[in-house]
Image (cartoon, coloured by chain):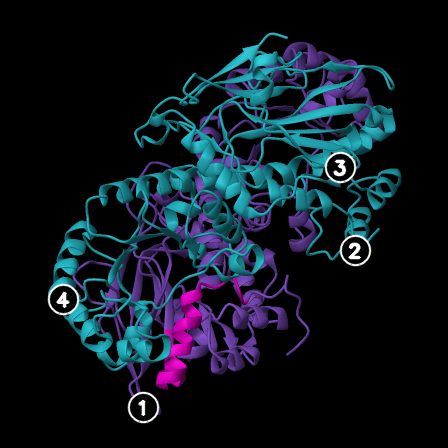
Chain colours: A purple, B cyan
Amino acid sequence: MDAITAHRSSALLTDRYELTMLQAALRSGAAHRRSVFEVFTRRLPDGRRYGVLAGTGRVLDAIEDFRFTAPQLDWLADQRVVDEETLRFLADYRFTGDVHGYPEGEAYFPGSPLLTVEGSFAEAVILETVILSILNHDSAIAAAASRMTAAAGGRPVIEMGARRAHERSAVAAARAAYLAGFAATSDLEAGFTHGIPTTGTAAHAFTLLHDSEKDAFTAQIDSMGRDTTLLVDTYDLGEAVRTAVEVAGPQLGAVRIDSGDLTLLAHRVRRQLDELGATDTKIIVTSDLDEYAIAALAAAPVDGYGVGTSLVTGSGHPTCAMVYKLVARESVPGGELVPVAKRSAGGKTSVGGRKWAARRPDRDGVAEAEVVGTGPVPAELAPHLLHVPLVTGGEVVGREPLEAARERHLRARAALPLSATQLSRGEPVITTERHAG
Amino acid sequence: MDAITAHRSSALLTDRYELTMLQAALRSGAAHRRSVFEVFTRRLPDGRRYGVLAGTGRVLDAIEDFRFTAPQLDWLADQRVVDEETLRFLADYRFTGDVHGYPEGEAYFPGSPLLTVEGSFAEAVILETVILSILNHDSAIAAAASRMTAAAGGRPVIEMGARRAHERSAVAAARAAYLAGFAATSDLEAGFTHGIPTTGTAAHAFTLLHDSEKDAFTAQIDSMGRDTTLLVDTYDLGEAVRTAVEVAGPQLGAVRIDSGDLTLLAHRVRRQLDELGATDTKIIVTSDLDEYAIAALAAAPVDGYGVGTSLVTGSGHPTCAMVYKLVARESVPGGELVPVAKRSAGGKTSVGGRKWAARRPDRDGVAEAEVVGTGPVPAELAPHLLHVPLVTGGEVVGREPLEAARERHLRARAALPLSATQLSRGEPVITTERHAG
């Protein structure tokens, strides 16, 4: 086993039942049956018109880092989570199978086969939890972020929700937001880890620390230059704008408004800045914005939006309903793959068999259907297949720069029908058709 | 600087503006002013009757681990986030101030001064983001968890939401749920890191992997013994229960139902189990439960609940609205502390001054008010003060076992008026009174 620290290992980010299933399957011999698992969702969050796949890059890291360290194995033994045979399997564990799926940033719909994991049951089943954790979280954030950047038109949107989310999920949220078109993040770790541009200047505390607002603005300008952003709503807004331009001159980069009726205040501050000659000074607004508030500010003289809580909480939908289901497995070792599916009356049923997916365009190139099938791919759909190889024989082959996923998302969104980016609640913007193989 | 790995360092889990404020304050000299920051919330989530403070233990770790590694400092320099003087400050950074606050697991209300951080502005301001990330996340989960365990009465509730949350926030969620009375978690990392009991046996995939349900059940019993939990809703529920008892005998530990009308099915399965002589076999239900669904199952023959999505998403409220505000600072270096507060017309105002808090009981010992003041503490409230010391002169003094917070939460909840645990929407169950000092 390569040296991998407990902090980097993803192996225990796993539900206990994955390992107990593994143990029982090793005992019964079924663990070695070739198996196909698929990630998909039965529905989009209520009212949403498209989903955005995010987290694939992090999934590839998690698969590579899925190794058990000695302290982890000792703990599993000590807690009697699994037996000796299973511990030996885990000590040598390394995924050797294949993964393919939708590329990161792509849009998706109910039933889209987002990720296909193929290998022995043993090696594939235990990846379930960490794969779902990553995709369900990151895709929920990306879907909300995509609505926000669409609502913002060309204006930049900045992610600043770290304080409203678990400290590590905030980093992944910044990544997902950037993928969906955000311009920057406040989160330094997201800059350090993922290379996302970071931004930020000062909070109310900085003004309160100084003996006067003027002292505070002077200190900030002295330290950061005139091109900085001054926060102008600690005391009286009009006075603060006057002081800001007095201290910085008309070259002042921007002012930020973090409370109040933003439409009204943006108009008032724009007028005041213009009267003071600060016609190039920008206005950034940041108070509890979501995609609806952003859209409502479209006609206001605003140059950029900062979004916190609603971004990191997925704007009402903090997770997706993606599942990881066994859809096919060897009939007997060495035999052929047979489709399998839950079929109880209570619901949560699925469709068996390994699937392909294509997004069929109409004659104008606009997406008109998500076609999902299990048999041979019709020739006319071959150019529109969605899956790409991600892991081949255990080796990651699908890693790409985050910028690539970011560009793909903008292309994918632009190829959907126009109503995709309507904020009102609706049905998925294209339907998913099952192709009888 | 002690050796601290980038993975353990909490220093970059920080909004960029904390460091730019630090730089400007170092330049102006105000950075060295003694300052008091408070964490509080202006409101509970809509309709909730009490909050639950969780994450304090993780905050103490984050304060200890708030050290900048060489690669982090190099990155900050390379990205020109801050200047040379600030980098030198960060390289030597170690919090030397004091922290006190509500003990973990305690209930709270709007305006409760949950955590007080006192030190120089420089050393205290940069802790804002990571402290809020942890408390806002963990307290949101604990509040939801507390409603669920109250709804469940004495029946055990198991946390199994890892797959619906960011992989690391899931671990913190399991911790917060345990603190609020959950019996166990599915998340192995939560067991490894926090010592929480873990549980789990098998998913539908295990049944689908085998050639028949009987083969699957036999494999599971062979491997885990008769005291295991068999999942009975992959194909036909009635047949599965019959097969389960046939294979395991009446000593079968439990069956799990993961889909369908759980009240109806629980009654049906209980009757069937009893008829088969498996009168001690328990019934566990796990399909999209929240506190309302748990309460609705109170009269059903159910022995335990598994909760996933709604737990890790805070049952509709995935974050809290806690803020970290400067409430007092030295007037001039060496001078006395003066209260400070934002006071613009736009909202988000706060009350200046360092605060104490007490929960005043009525003559029956039931909480009747949260009293918050800035002056001397009235003698009759002294025995009911809520703050405990957490960090003194930079040394953590408030660390405690998770079990202590768990016991405290149950005591604190029991001391609230009975209507606290009503699930219907309402006002905070006690009011917060300001004591004029």
Q: Residue at x 50, y 22 (%)?
A: B110
Dot 2 falls on a residue whose secondary structure is helix
Q: Residues within 10 Å of mark 3 (few under 14, many from 20)?
A: many
Asked whether, in this view, residue B22 is left or right of residue A353, the answer is right
Dot 1 falls on a residue whose secondary structure is loop
Task: Please state which of the two labelled residues, at mark 4 or mark 1, is closer to the viewer.
Answer: 4
Residue holding disc 2: B71
Give the residue type at disc 1. Gly
Circles 1 and 3, Cβ within 8 Å, touching? The answer is no
Residue A24 within the magenta-colored segment of the rendering: yes
Q: Locate residue B267, reporting x and y percent.
A: 15, 54
Q: CA distance from mark 2 to mark 4?
A: 60 Å
Residue A134 within the magenta-colored segment of the rendering: no
What stretch of residues is rendered in magenta?
A11-36
> Would residue B187 be seen by someone viewing this image from the given angle?
yes
Q: Locate residue A179, reporting x and y percent.
A: 54, 51
Residue holding disc 3: B19
Give the residue type at disc 4. Gly
Q: Chain of mark 1?
A: A
Compare marks 2 and 3 and give the one earlier in the sequence. Answer: 3
Asked whether, in this view, residue A102 is left or right of residue B169, the answer is left
> Is A314 situated above or below B8?
above
Q: Locate residue A319, reporting x and y percent.
A: 42, 49
Using the image, tell me which numbered label, if any, was put on residue A335: 1
Q: CA distance from mark 4 to mark 3?
A: 62 Å
Residue holding disc 4: B238
